[in-house]
Amino acid sequence: MRRSLIAAALAALLAAAAAPTAHAASPGLRQTYDDALKGARYVDLTHTITPTIPVWAGFGPSQFAASLNPSTGNPYTYENDGFEATRYTLATDQLGTQLDPPAHWAPEYAGIDELPATLAVRPLALISTAAQNRKDFNYALKVSDIRKWEIQHGRIPAGSVVFVRSDWSKRWPDPNLAKLTKFPGVSLKALEFLHLQRHILFHGHEPLDTDSTPTLEGESWLMHHGYAQAEGVANLDQVPATGCLVDIGYPKFGGGLGGYARYIAICPPGAKHGQRIGQVPEAPLRKFATPLHWNAANTMRVR
């Protein structure tokens, strides 16, 4: 029974939200949290953004620096001002772990700030091509791979998120990753099948592009048909094929064409990986022996 709690959590959330009054809905949502989410394991699927992570050469590097007081031109310091802050000069909104809205390629569709709030929590299906990619690094997910997955795990639910594991991200943050012209992909036929036959919300992959075709045919098809996608997803080797939810968060930049996303897999209590609520300090948060400080070599704050 416990193994099915996480998989059923979304249905319970939706049922509770459909209750006629806020008073009736609230206990149901709390019960779902207590029964399923409080004891779950949480796996971060997100790369940390730094000035040196892989990024397409056409965008160039980003820069981190201390925030300056416009009146003096000096950086804020703990000693003089009681706080510090960071100024980010980001070369692109296509950076690190991302959520691509279709307006990235097709301006008639939604930008990042126009994506609906209903994307927040969805069932997660994990399809692995890691074995194929070990033999052929340029292997792209095929419809036959999806059908084989469904024979073992059941039909992919409509409205779910499908992440494709290739283990490409195990080499992160090697900047040479962004220079590769051949890398694991998702074929156009697989994308068409997932969206038109299974009606998923969106798919995600580890590399920074959908495929290595000359025209990026998969990404082009997605964007020009109004579909979003996730890129640069991490730690997919820590997620089981089924039974998890995915929590989706991203900054809401006005007119944004990409999102610096945070994906968290919410997995059953018996999953092998992930943290449990209460396992690490949360409120108050952990106090470190070494304070954050500016490192000129890294051009960012480190411990």
Image (cartoon, rainbow, N blue to C red):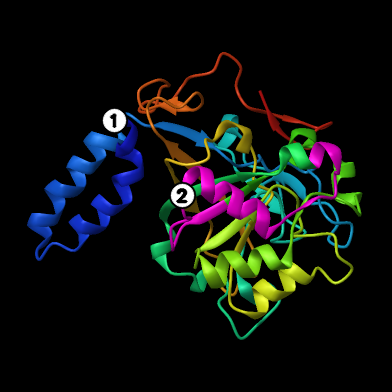
CA–CA distance in space, label 1 to label 2: 19 Å
Please say whether residue 42 is visible from this viewpoint. Answer: yes
Q: Which mark is residue 29?
A: none
Tell me where residue 296 appears, x and y as whole percent.
Answer: 81, 32
Is 159 in the magenta?
Answer: yes
Tell me where residue 217 appears, x and y as whole percent.
Answer: 78, 71
Disc 2 packing (10 Å; few <14; some 14–19; many ≥20): few
Is 157 in the magenta?
Answer: yes
Please say whether residue 70 is visible from this viewpoint. Answer: no
Question: Quick one: SS at disc 2?
Answer: loop
> Relative to 59, is 222 above or below?
below
- List the residue tagged with mark 2: 154
Q: Amino acid at mark 2?
A: Gly
* Side (left or right) of 224 relative to 201: right
* Comes first in the chain, label 1 or label 2: 1
Q: Which residue is painted at 49% across and 28% down in the image?
A: 274
Question: For residue 117, what is the image quadrant?
Answer: bottom left
> Relative to 107, is 292 above or below?
above
Give the residues drawn in magenta, as a range. Answer: 133-162
User: Residue lying furthest bottom in this view?
Assistant: 108
